[in-house]
Amino acid sequence: MKCILRIRRHPELGIYAAPVSQHDADEFAKLNLNSDYRAVITKPRNPGHHSKAFALIQLIFENQDRYSNLEDLLTEIKLLSGWYDHHVRAPRPAPILDYLERMAGKLPAPFQSQLLRAAQKLRDEAGVVYIPKSIAFESMDQTAFEEFYKRLLEIAKDDFGVDAGEFA
């Protein structure tokens, strides 16, 4: 069951939840009194805030030359903002890393240790895949979107040199 309730405060009744629409009222009426229910409370997304975010993303796109399409830029923004899941793949042989480690033995000591450290770092990170999460309305509530938007403003300035002052 899904229904949207608005939390209200009444001087005599105190805090209560009221259905927002007739559909929500019908769903809410199906609940049994004196029964326990678990609820997930989210703040509905603000369509205007969503539009504002995409206007800023469009501005970033128009003022950069790293990405040839908006979708690739959006993917990068999601990754930079931390809006992703980790997926760890099972390790698999990495012939180029084995080659680098063998070649390190033929280099002078300072270069050898640098190459070995770099090869180990590549080997350690080779199994992690970052999967950007969706920012669609049903994927995140307004509270999560506000955090994403805050990071978007920082990314616009710090990573793309775009003045996002009018979007703050």
Image (tube, grey):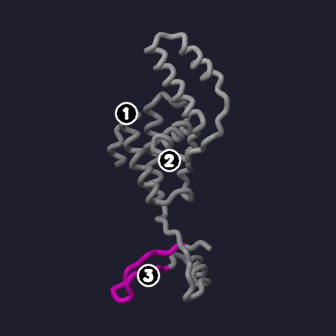
**Between tags 2 and 3, which lies in front?**
2
Upstream in the sequence, badge 2 or badge 1? 2
Disc 2: which residue: 83
The residue located at (46%, 14%) in the rendering is 111
Image quadrant assignment for residue 70: top right
* The disc label shown at residue 161, or none: 1
Q: Secondary structure at mark 1?
A: loop
Q: Is residue 85 left or right of residue 151?
A: right
Badge count:
3
* Measured Cα–Cα span from mark 3 to mark 1: 47 Å
Upstream in the sequence, badge 2 or badge 3? 3
Upstream in the sequence, badge 3 or badge 1? 3
The residue located at (43%, 39%) in the rendering is 59
The residue located at (56%, 48%) in the rendering is 133
Residue contact between numbered discs 2 and 1, judged by CB atoms under 8 Å: no
* Measured Cα–Cα span from mark 2 to mark 3: 33 Å
Check disc 1 and give the amino acid type: Gly
The residue located at (60%, 42%) in the rendering is 88
Image: magenta residue range: 4-18
Check disc 2 and give the amino acid type: Trp
Using the image, determine if residue 41 lies above or below residue 104.
below
Q: Secondary structure at mark 3?
A: strand
> How many C-alpha atoms fall within 10 Å of the one at disc 3: few (<14), some, or many (≥20)?
few
Can you give x and y, in whole percent of width and height, for residue 73 in the image? 51, 37
Can you give x and y, in whole percent of width and height, for residue 99 in the image? 62, 18
Disc 3: which residue: 16
* Measured Cα–Cα span from mark 2 to mark 1: 21 Å
The reply to whether the magenta stretch includes residue 8 is: yes
| Dominant secondary structure, magenta | strand
Image quadrant assignment for residue 159: top left
Check disc 3 and give the amino acid type: Tyr
**Between tags 3 and 1, which lies in front?**
3
